[in-house]
Amino acid sequence: MVPINTLLRTQKSDDQILKPVIPGVNLPKKDLGYYLVTIFISALVHEFGHAVAAVRESVRINGFGMFVFVIYPGAFVDMHSETLFAVSAWKQLKIFCAGVWHNLVVVLIGALMLYSLPTTLRPFYTLNENLVIVSHTENSVVSGESGLIPGDIVTQINDCKVSSILSWRNCLTLALDSDTMMSYAVPQSVMDVQSHPTSLTEKDCVCGDTDNHICFQRNPLAVSPPNSKENLICLKAREVIIYSPCKELSPSTVCVAPYIGHLNNKTRLLVLYRTKKPPVLFFGHPAELHLSVIIGEVVPRFSWIPLFLPYTLENLFKYFISLSGALALLNIVPCYALDGQYIAKAVTDIVFKNFTADQREIILTLSVLCGTLLLVVNVALAMYNLLL
Ligand SMILES: [Zn+2]
């Protein structure tokens, strides 16, 4: 368990500066790799900072090592305590603060890299020009062979143009809000090879085969179409969507629309047009489609450039900022067993150098007790919010 700051998070408990991270609880499994790599490198940089400062101040180093506590990786530097406490308080302060400021340098580099990422990527990727499918979510309903594939550029949903995350959301909202389904003017010849539903109950309209036939309704724009078996027909959705909307109806065409009388009244037939590929059909709630995919606006300019790289880098930089920042913050608090305890001692020795040793000891004990209490309460509150 390592507290992190909350730059990454947007949930309710974000007002806390530090909160514990427990893989599988508030750390998504897919982010575990980022977490382990960044916490390990941040800890390594932190200890490296102590070691370099110690060598500069002529303090002996006994050893430098790495460890894994359960699944939390860490590092340590073992300084020779006699030579360490023999140097002046000012030099001790520099050595004990070195870990913290090395972590702050990592935060600064991470922030600069994150900020300059759009400029760095521009020669290789188009930004904010197209909407691309980056990946599927865990229980995606469009991950099959005839579904959406990572790298697909979606240009249109039904008759609504898509070019950004915002327009993707707007098009789905539009589809959801429209009272009528998309309707199509289908030639009579197509209707001639229709089949009727194999079963029709109040709750269900079933087309006999699984060959992408769905239940359509004739004349959906009529005021109150009777839902009789004669008015409901099974057609191949993929063959229907190529025809014009019903506003261009001619005497030789028949207007049809997907029948949703028996389904959730928010069920829609969505036709997702892609560049260089046939459209994908989605029959369901638009929100379900939205929750099935992770979308982005960064698209590789060339086929050999990996799609996921910008998203990986963005996540990595955010984790470095969060975890390195958390290590710095955690170690600056005057808390027992952390750098803050020794930093507080060195500061007390410098600021109150005219006080007696006993007086300095009282000031130090009080400040470390307060800091420890503050940290323990913070972590306890965070655990309470997280687990209860
Ligand atoms: Zn340290």
Image (tube, rainbow, N blue to C red):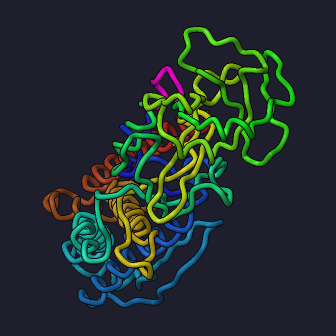
Asked if residue 176 lies in the magenta stretch, the reply is: yes
In this rendering, position of residue 336 left or right of residue 226: left
Please tell me in which quadrant of the rendered image residue 254 appears: top right
Q: Quadrant of ligand 1?
A: bottom left
Q: What is the count of numbered marks?
A: 0
Which image quarter holds the N terminus? bottom right
Please tell me in which quadrant of the rendered image residue 78 appears: bottom left
60 to 240, vertically: above or below: below
Picture coordinates of residue 59, whole percent (x, y): 32, 87
Instruction: Give me the residue at 66% from left, 40% from top.
Output: 189
Which image quarter holds the C terminus? top right
Please tell me in which quadrant of the rendered image residue 300 appears: bottom left
Picture coordinates of residue 149, whole percent (x, y): 56, 61
Q: Closer to the camera, 72 or 136?
A: 136
In this rendering, position of residue 124 left or right of residue 27: left
Q: Closer to the camera, 373 or 189?
A: 189
Q: Closer to the camera, 333 or 282?
A: 282
Instruction: Give me the residue at 50% from left, 48% from top.
Output: 272
Instruction: Give me the residue at 66% from left, 25% from top.
Output: 217
Task: Tell me if I can see residue 218 in this picture.
Answer: yes
Residue that sits furthest to the front in the current view? 251
189 to 297, vertically: above or below: above
Task: Tell me if I can see residue 101 in this picture.
Answer: no
Picture coordinates of residue 236, whole percent (x, y): 69, 44
228 to 129, vertically: above or below: above
The magenta-colored residue range is 175-181
Asked if residue 38 lies in the magenta stretch, the reply is: no
Instruction: Give me the residue at 37% from left, 48% from top.
Output: 162
Residue that sits furthest to the top in the current view? 224
